[in-house]
Image (cartoon, helix red, strand yellow):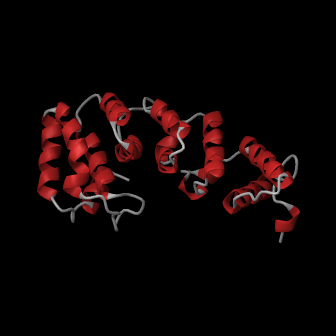
């Protein structure tokens, strides 16, 4: 994902002239981003972008506005997130990997992952989630399992999944089996992949016997 790909996907928005002008204003006067951020949904629409799966027009426009800043990306991202509604928070989270902020946005991920808003949780686990330390990342994946967020949204899931995550998932699967509750299929599939990669998971594969092929 790049600013150029966001611009390309936004070519058909209802008011492209407004977006171009807003980007110029933000580059010249960063303080104008607050009003532009709030207006993006009304001026650019909120529909899903056909050329950018998983992104809505307002999210892409708001991400572009953040990339137009010439300084203090982390400070503006935090302020817009803290004072924004759910849609604005999601846009900030999705924009983080495009900004030159290093790990400064990690507190925003932690905040999103503490909520029960599954769309915020999903947005927090995009490419910027590489900044999460292993323990926090494992807990975030487990949060997806608990809240029903598809594991497909987790950036680099198979690359980062390790024995620690496998043990946590296996333990949860055993608890759910004992309680007669189902484990999400994508979590069981991940356990299978991890078992195939590194051998049986301590405590079993985590797949209840009735679900084995």
Q: Is residue 61 visible?
A: yes
Q: In front: 120, or 97?
A: 120
Which residue is pictured at 88% across the width and 47% down the height? 203
| Front one among 14 and 191 | 14
Q: Residue furthest bottom?
A: 213
Q: Residue 84, position in %: x, y?
A: 34, 38
Is residue 205 something one can see in this rendering? no
Position of residue 19 measured from the top left corner of the image (x, y, whole percent): 17, 51
Q: Is residue 150 above or below residue 136?
A: below
Asked if residue 181 lies left or right of residue 209, the reply is left
Give the answer, above or below, for where 212 lies relative to 200. Answer: below
Tally the marks: 0
Write the residue at 25% across / 43% down.
37
Residue 212 lies in what quarter of the image?
Answer: bottom right
For the C terminus, which image quadrant? Answer: bottom right
- Tell me where residue 189 appears, x and y as whole percent: 72, 61
Indicate the position of residue 115 as horizontal and vertical percent values: 52, 40
Residue drawn at point x = 53 percent, y = 55 percent: 153
Image quadrant of residue 193? bottom right
Would residue 19 be found to the left or right of residue 205 on screen? left
Give the left or right position of residue 26, taking residue 117 as reference: left
């Amino acid at each position: 994902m790049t600013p150029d790909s966001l611009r390309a996907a936004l070519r058909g928005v209802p008011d492209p002239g407004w977006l171009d002008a807003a980007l110029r204003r933000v580059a010249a006067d960063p303080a104008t981003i607050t009003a532009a951020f709030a207006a993006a949904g009304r001026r650019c629409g909120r529909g899903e972008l056909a050329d950018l799966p998983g992104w809505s027009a307002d999210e892409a426009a708001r991400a572009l506005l953040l990339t137009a800043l010439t300084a203090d990306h982390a400070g503006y991202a935090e302020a817009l997130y803290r004072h924004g509604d759910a849609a604005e928070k999601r846009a900030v989270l999705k924009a983080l990997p495009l900004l030159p902020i290093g790990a400064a946005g990690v507190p925003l991920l932690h905040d999103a992952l503490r909520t029960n808003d599954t769309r915020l949780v999903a947005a927090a686990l995009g490419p910027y989630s590489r900044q999460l330390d292993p323990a926090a990342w494992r807990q975030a994946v487990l949060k997806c399992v608990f809240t029903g967020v598809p594991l497909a949204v987790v950036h680099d899931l198979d690359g980062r999944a390790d024995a620690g995550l496998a043990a946590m998932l296996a333990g949860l699967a055993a608890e759910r089996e004992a309680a007669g509750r189902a484990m999400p299929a994508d979590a069981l599939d991940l356990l299978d992949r991890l078992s195939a990669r590194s051998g049986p998971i301590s405590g079993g594969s985590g797949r209840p016997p009735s679900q084995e092929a």
